[in-house]
Each structure stands twice: as C-alpha cells, then as structure tokens.
Amino acid sequence: MASSSAISDNHRAALDKLKAELGSGAESGLGDDVKMAYSNVNAQPSQATTRACMLNDGVGTITLHDYKDWSGKVFGSYPPSIPMTRSGKSTHRGVPPKDSQGSMGAVVYVGSNVQGQPNNCAWVLAWWVAGDGSSNKIYVETGPCSKYPKNKIDWDSIKDMLMNSINESNHRDDDTGAEASAKIDETGNIPACAVVFDVTL
C-alpha cells in the first residue's frame, strides 16, 4: 500500500539545504562537470540540464538498480551507491535537436529498511526539464524491490505520472516505510533538483 502526501517540514528543510548546495542555475555557478560539458563546441547554455543532489537519509547504503533516459543522457554517470547520511550528485542534459524533449529521465535506487538486512525497498526519481520555457517537473515513488524488477520496470507508468506532476513530489510506501521527497526549480533550463530518500517506519 502506498500514499502520497505533502512534504514534511524535516524533508523540506533537507531539500532546501541540498538545493543551496547545488547553487544557482547561472552558468557561473555550475559545477565543474557541467562547465566541461559546455566547453564542447556543440554545447549551448540553453540546453536543458538537470542538476540533481540525492540524499540518502535511510538506514544503510543504497545502490543504483536501474535507470531510464527518455530524452538526453547523464553526463558522466549516476552515483552507483550512496552511503547512509551522504548525498550523491548527477547531471543530466538534453542536446537539441536530437533530444527534442530536453532532459527527461529516471533512476531507481534500492536498499533496506533494516540496517544490515537484504534490500527490500526501492526509491524512484523521475524528472523533466523541457528547456522550452514550460514548468519543470519532478516525480518520486517508493515501494518494495519486487515491484521494480531490473530490466522489466514499467517505465511507461512512471513517465505518465511524471507528465502529470508539478515541481515537487512526495511518496511513502506504507508496507516498507520507504519514503521520498523531491523538489526542482519550477522554471529555468538548468534547474537544481533536490531529493531525499528515507525510511520512516
């Protein structure tokens, strides 16, 4: 059983801190990885670029389980694992005209709701930065690992939920206690995206 609700005060404070860590979307405030991307002669500052910072606030290390690039691709790689109380960063960008929908992708991380036990929880993050002036979107969901079999994830369902989302999202799976909250700058082609993966039993 799963539920969606408003982002808690604790999660909202953590999201604000993560977004501050990412800094402004102005090119002068970009990380070195994005600056390197823009040094490419084919790169344009107007490209849709999602700068994400994901905090693992659960009870153990979480690991990357699967990902989907609908439009654009990750610059470098997604964090393969994120230790407890630590954050992992990634940069995803769309290169027009090939990536006609800008930066649109999703990642699934897995971990446990009991420290030292086998993975039984999954956290999903999906984003869309169209780069055409429309509002940026973010979507999270959680559930048992069995709901997200590797290479057989229902990406179409996740994309549908993303398309109907706004610039912040919260989801909690009542059975596992896995919870996720996320927020992305509502506008701008190079927004900051902050995410908290948590276990709230």
Image (cartoon, rainbow, N blue to C red):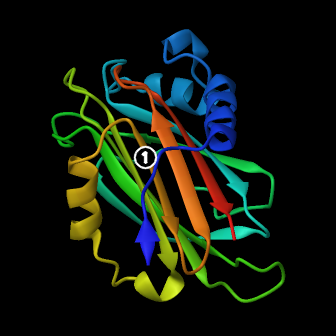
Residue at the (52%, 64%) spot, across then down:
172
The reply, left or right, for residue 39 in relation to residue 109 is left
Examine the image and state in which quarter residue 46 appears: top left
Residue at the (24%, 34%) spot, across then down:
130
Q: Amino acid at mark 1?
A: Ser
Residue 137 at x, y percent in the picture: 32, 39
Q: Is residue 13 above or below residue 30?
A: below
**Front-most of 66 and 19?**
19
Which residue position holds label 1? Answer: 169
**Front-most of 29 and 161?**
161
Examine the image and state in which quarter residue 122 appears: bottom right
**Front-most of 196 and 28?**
196
The reply, left or right, for residue 115 in relation to residue 34 is right
Residue 179 at x, y percent in the picture: 57, 62
Q: Quadrant of the N terminus?
A: bottom left
Res. 135 in view: yes
Residue 201 at x, y percent in the picture: 69, 71
